[in-house]
Amino acid sequence: MELFSVAVLVLAVVIVALGVKRVPQGMEYTVERFGRYTKTLRPGLNLIIPLVDSVGAKLNMMEQVLDVPSQEVITKDNAMVTVDGVVFFQVLDAAKAAYEVSQLTHAILNLTMTNVRTVMGSMDLDELLSMRDQINAKLLAVVDDATTPWGIKVTRIEIKDISPPRDLVDAMARQMKAEREKRAQILEAEGMRQAEILKAEGEKQAAILEAEGEREAAFREAEARERLAEAEAKATMMVSQAIAKGDVNAINYFVAQKYTEALKDIASAPNQKLIMMPLEASSLIGSVGGIAELAREAVGKSNRGEP
């Protein structure tokens, strides 16, 4: 009797233990009643009906990473490249992830690899190497949309490496070198052209400034001649007025000045290498005196009213 009671007690403890389920943080368990899904157990202690309910699938609800193995992809321009990557995903609905798809990670991996070939195969090699962000975005949109019915959220897809064949890498290196040499030559030619333009602009500006200087000098020279002519005319007028008033010294000054200027012009003429003239200071003074005497007589007659 006592043995039976102990057995019943042990059985009761076992049954109660079967009805208590502890779910760790970051996990969710599905509960099946006679093989049919009934509910999902959240993290913490949970109770189920022993021998009636059972734990179906244990789902990791944290974000997970899945390596995409290397595979060969033929691009739109028939270049073969080797590509690999990673997928980050998170289970949002444990029931769908457990019962809408079999072998969840295997399904996500195959779906990603298939779309890698589809997306990258529709692009040229140059686009493939220069538009990695756009490739990741396209893959994410396609795979995330396809896995939504499974209760999955694909958060990121990253293409880790794109490796063209060795001969293609060598050809790309040669192309890059030729392109850089071309750009260097273009820049050098552009620099020479700019230098020639700047030099021509400088010469043009110098010619303009020189012409403006010559014009200014000519203007000032003409102005100086005009002032000199005005001064000379004024002096002549003053001398004429002095002569009219009978001032013989004015005549002497006027004649001596003109005579001296004529001698200066003759002496400084460029076509005269040697000048032989009987020039004496006394002759000059005599000439001036004679002229002055004639002027004095003319003035005297004029004052007396003689013809």
Image (cartoon, rainbow, N blue to C red):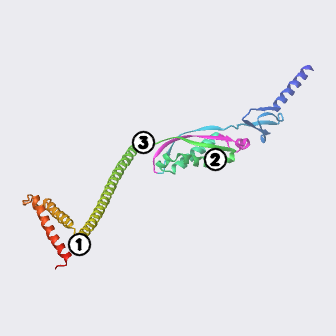
- Amino acid type of the residue tagged 1 in the rendering: Ala
Lateral position of residue 105 relative to residue 245, left or right: right
Q: Which residue is mark 3?
A: 169
Badge 1 marks a residue whose secondary structure is helix
The disc at residue 144 is 2
Badge 3 marks a residue whose secondary structure is helix
The C terminus appears in which quarter of the rendering? bottom left
Observer-nearest residue: 303 or 143?
303
Magenta region: 77-104
Q: Are marks 2 and 3 in contact (CB under 8 Å)?
A: no
Q: Residues within 10 Å of mark 3 (few under 14, many from 20)?
A: few
Observer-nearest residue: 87 or 199?
199
Q: Nearer the viewer, mark 2 or mark 1?
A: 1
Lateral position of residue 186 relative to residue 111, left or right: left
Q: Residues within 10 Å of mark 1 (few under 14, many from 20)?
A: few
Residue at (55% x, 46% y) in the render: 133
Badge 2 marks a residue whose secondary structure is helix
- Does residue 69 lie above or below 200 as drawn? above
Magenta run includes residue 148 = no
- The alpha-carbon separation of the residues under discs 2 and 3 comes to 33 Å
Looking at this view, name the residue that lies furthest to the top. 2
Please tell me which of labels 3 and 1 falls first in the chain: 3
